[in-house]
Every structure is written in structure tokens, then in C-alpha cells.
Image (cartoon, rainbow, N blue to C red):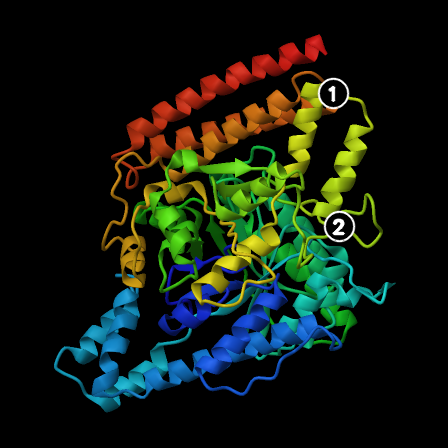
Amino acid sequence: MNKLHAFHIPVMGIGFTIDSPLKVAQYGIDSVISLVDDILLEKLRKMYSDTFAVPYQEITNKMDDYRAKRITSYLDLIHDLIEKKFEALKQVSAEKMDAIYTYVNMLPENSSIKADFKRITSNGHNFTEIKNWVNKNLKLGSIDVNIMTKVDKDNYLKNEKLPVEYNDAHAALRGFANSKLNSSVVLSAGLNPRLYSYMSQFEDFYPNENGVFKKKIILKVSDYRSALIQGKFLAKKGLWISEFRIESGLNCGGHAFATDGYLLGPVLAEFREKREELKTTLQELVQQEFLNQNRIFPENLSIKISAQGGVGTHEEHEFLIKEYHLDSVGWGTPFLLVPEATTVDEKTLNRLVDAKEEDLYLSNISPLGVPFNNLRNNTKDTERDVLINKGRPGSSCPKKFVALNKEFKENGICTASREYQHLKIKELGAMGLPSNDYEIKYHEIVEKSCTCVGLGTSALLAYNLDTKIEGEGVSICPGPNMAYYSKIMSLKNITDHIYGRDDMITRTDRPNVFIKELYIYIDYLKNKLESFKFSMNKKDEKHLLTFTNNLNEGISYYKHLFQESKNAFQDVKEVVLKELDKGEKILNTINSEIENMAVLN
């Protein structure tokens, strides 16, 4: 059966979608749990076990393979609770009809299931007929999980390095693979050869003779080239990618994996044109590996294509699906304002409601060294600033999930930690730099924030759980879209908004998704240019010119797209075309600056 909904809720932060499936899967909505923080998962497992009177036995860090076991146990609990909730819904009675109506009413207007339900209930309620219909037509949303492939820290026992399968991402994968879930793992943040090879050990990732998978692979990418490279690597292991999830490089929440100026529209167009070619290429490689392994190769393997990042209106949603033949569109940031779907503490929720454009910015606070969408003056950054002012910058690093830097220690330190920053500042002091240069370098060191803790703390605060180890500072990672939503919404509100039955955006100045992304990229390019101002080599010049050229090609693509469009964006077409002309002029100026700088350097 195909998906009932045309959208999914992507992973957000560490804790914001930690229990989203428990809130939305009963309505057929797919959502994604982060597997970064097994400590948080264990705390929530205890909480939900107590709430639903499920026997609980703590998995302590003294146990062998505790990280994988915690993840498996949490996912199994969520699976069981959702199944129980859904089974209760399917026991159709007069008391349950409201819940069934809620489910059906959330479906898109063009849903054949919705039309069929209206037909069978048009003359009253025949509960036997409705029960048969519910069992046949309604289904749970998928309980998917996310693994950031590069967050794969080595682990040690009594100063002895453990085998690679105990690395963080490996253990998370094992935790998912050993769970009861019949769902997908979303792999993000790029190719990790060791992790991808490790996946081939788990039978659940292979299809049966009917082409049915118990565990599927979704690959999150920002361009076609990356999809092809990673797809071929996995295919050579006999692993099939069931879905490519294309994410706008900068116009989304959380970490912003900037491309070389490749914009979402042209990237999606390339996937649309090469979809069958991609499928054929990967199918041939998987088929060959199946032959090597004496496996039966099913003939009905399929690849889904979805996208996410910056979409904010029903018109944009529909356009992406129809123009690029997408199977689903991810809606992230707006769902942070939906307590029925995500988990955000009250104070942070109110900050998000009040956030304007200037409060949402692309920061350098992430210890991973990747640009990070941030909410200005969030409480975790305030905590960090207090420590800087005390002359003791850096976090105590209680969880160490991103202790990946090996400059000073073989077993890795987090760049947001007190230990790392102390050593780095000491190193900086010995360089004898002029005071201005020293201050710039000092700020680059101390601006890193403890996001691996901060992105999970909101869930603890929301449920009044102990934060003694973590502290109460919250990091939050909304995309720029947050500026245009200014109220807390119900699940009905947001689904009605997505499907065009209501409008949750009260402002009239929200730019089109493609224009917003373009100008974020232009700002990013300007910052890159500024950083190369006094020392630009040939490699830097080539990178900047490639970036500018790709943005210009993107503008040309969008000009043609909007000029030719007959059924979409009619009310904003003129504004969009003016913004594209303006962007083109800015890029021409930047291009001249790059060439002038190249001459001077």
C-alpha cells in the first residue's frame, strides 16, 4: 500500500522528534527518531514504561554493548505502544468513531481512501462494515530512525580501544537492526565506508523473494552525484536504497551541509530526469552481488524520491510533488510549533513563536565544524557565554557524542569542551599574534556550543525529567522558515495547512522557497568571499567561481521554470522574476570581486 500522506516529519535535533512516532504514527504519518543520544533514549524508556505500566529494567553503562541495547529496547517499546494504540483504534465502536474521523479528516483532499470513507458512512454507521474497512485501509505511519554517519566516535573500555562495531554509529545501526521495527534508517551526513560495509551483516536489510524488506535504507543527499556515489557503494554490498531524500543544502533546520551552490530546483530536476538511469545502475550492481551471495533477486524493487528543506505553503508542497514527481515532501521547522507532534519545552516554544528573521541565523557553533541553523540567544549559548565571561570557556562535555577531534588526544575530544578549548587557547597564546588577530582566533575557538547535550535537553524539560548532568540549557535548530509562523498549532492545524484547507502563515511577506534558498546561498557566498579577502589561492578562487557559476545556472533554471509555469505561483511570479534578476546582478558583482581579488593575490 502506498503512503496515505504526502508529507513526512524529518528528524529534528536530538530530542525534538525523539517520540514523534508515538504522537503521530497512529494517524498514518511517518516521522524520524534521532539515535545520537542513548542516554536520553533510556530516560524516556523509563518514563514511558512507568506511564504505561510496562516492566522496566535499566540498561546501565556497565553492561556490554549497552548503547545498542538501549536503542533496541527504546525502539521496541515505542513499537509496542504504537501497535497497542492502533489496535485499540481498530476495535470500531461508537466511542472510537471520533478517533477514526480524526485520522480520515487529516488525509489529503484527493485521497481515494477519504472519499471511500465518506461513501460508507454517508447513511450512518454500520460498525461491522466500518471495522472491515478500517482494517483494510488504515495503517500506521513509519517509525523511522536517523543516523548521522560521521558521528561515529571510537569507544574505549579501561583505556583499551573497542572493536569498530562498538563505535557510536555502528552501535546505533545494530540497535535499530535488532529491533522489532519494520521501517527505515535515514543515513545522513555523507559516506562512511566502514558503517556501510557493516550494514551488510544484517539480514533485515535484504529483501525476501517477494521484494519485501523488514528494514529499508533511506539516503539523505543534497545532489545527484552524492546519491550515485553512495548508492553504488551500498549496491556493491548488495544493499538496496529504497528512497533518496534530497535536502536543500542551506534552507533547512539543524546542520546546513552547503553544496557548491547547487540549488534545490535544478537538483530535483536532475533526479527526475535520471531516476530510471539511477535505478538501473544500482539494480545491476545489486543483482550481481545477489548472484555472488546466492540470493534470489526480486524483480519489483523500487526507488522513491522525496525532498525537504524550506517548504512552507500548500502551493509549494503541491508544486514540488507534481513538477518533480516526488513521493513525499518533508516538513520540519513548522512542526516544532506543534506539541502534538514534537517535543519542545514551553520556554523554547514561546521563543520560537516570537522569532523573527534576525533571530534565525546560520552559525558556527557546531562542534562538527559544519554551519548550523541557530536561534539567537538560546539558553545553551547563554550558558556558554557565562563560562567565557568567567574565563573558563568550554563545556564539561558530559556525553561526549561528538568527541571526534584528535589534535590533542588519540581517543578524541569535542571542540566545544573545556579540555579542548583550554589546550587550543594555550596553543593560540604561544603564536604571538597581534591582538586583533588573536581575538578573531579566540572567538572561533570559544563560540562552539555543546549541541549534543543542548539538542536533547528540551525533551527532558518538557517531561520534567532530571537534568542534573545535562544542565537546563537548550539548543534549538529551526530553519529560516520559522520567522513566518507565529503561533502554536495543533496537528489538525498543520495538516490542514499542508493540504491547503487552512493557512497558518499570517504574514504576507514570506518569500518563495526557491528565492529564500537562493539568497541564503548568496549570503553564504559573501561570507566565504570575506574569509578569503586577504589570502586567496588558486584553489579558493576556483571554488568561489564554481560556486558563483552554479548559482547563476540555478537562476537561469528558475527564470525558465517560472516563466513557463502556467498553473502555479501566478500571484508571486512577477516578484520572483524580479528577485531572480536582482540575484543575478549581485552574483555578477561578486564574480568581478573574485576576479579582482585573484589579480591582487
Identify which residue is drawn at 22% across, 89% down: 127
Q: Position of residue 138 (x, y in %)?
A: 35, 76
Helix, strand or loop at label 2? It is: loop
User: Would residue 109 be seen by someone viewing this image from the given angle?
Assistant: yes
**Element type where label 1 sits in the image:** helix
Labels 2 & 1 near each other (Cβ < 8 A): no
- Residue sticking out furthest to the front: 390
| Residue 35 shown left or right of residue 164 in the figure | left
Residue 334 is tagged as: none
Identify the amino acid type marked 2.
Answer: Ile
**260 or 532, which lies in front?**
532
Left or right of 118, for residue 74? right
Q: Nearer the viewer, residue 98 or 278?
A: 98
Q: Which residue is mark 1?
A: 538
Locate residue 174: give its quadrant.
Answer: bottom right
Residue drawn at (77%, 73%) of the image: 293
Category of crowding for the residue at label 1, using alpha-carbon neighbours closer than 10 angstroms: few (below 14), some (14–19), many (at least 20): few
Q: Which residue is mark 2?
A: 413
Q: In the image, what residue type sits under mark 1?
A: Lys
Residue 411 locus on image (x, y percent): 81, 55
Q: Quadrant of the C terminus?
A: top right
Classify residue 454 as left or right of residue 85.
right
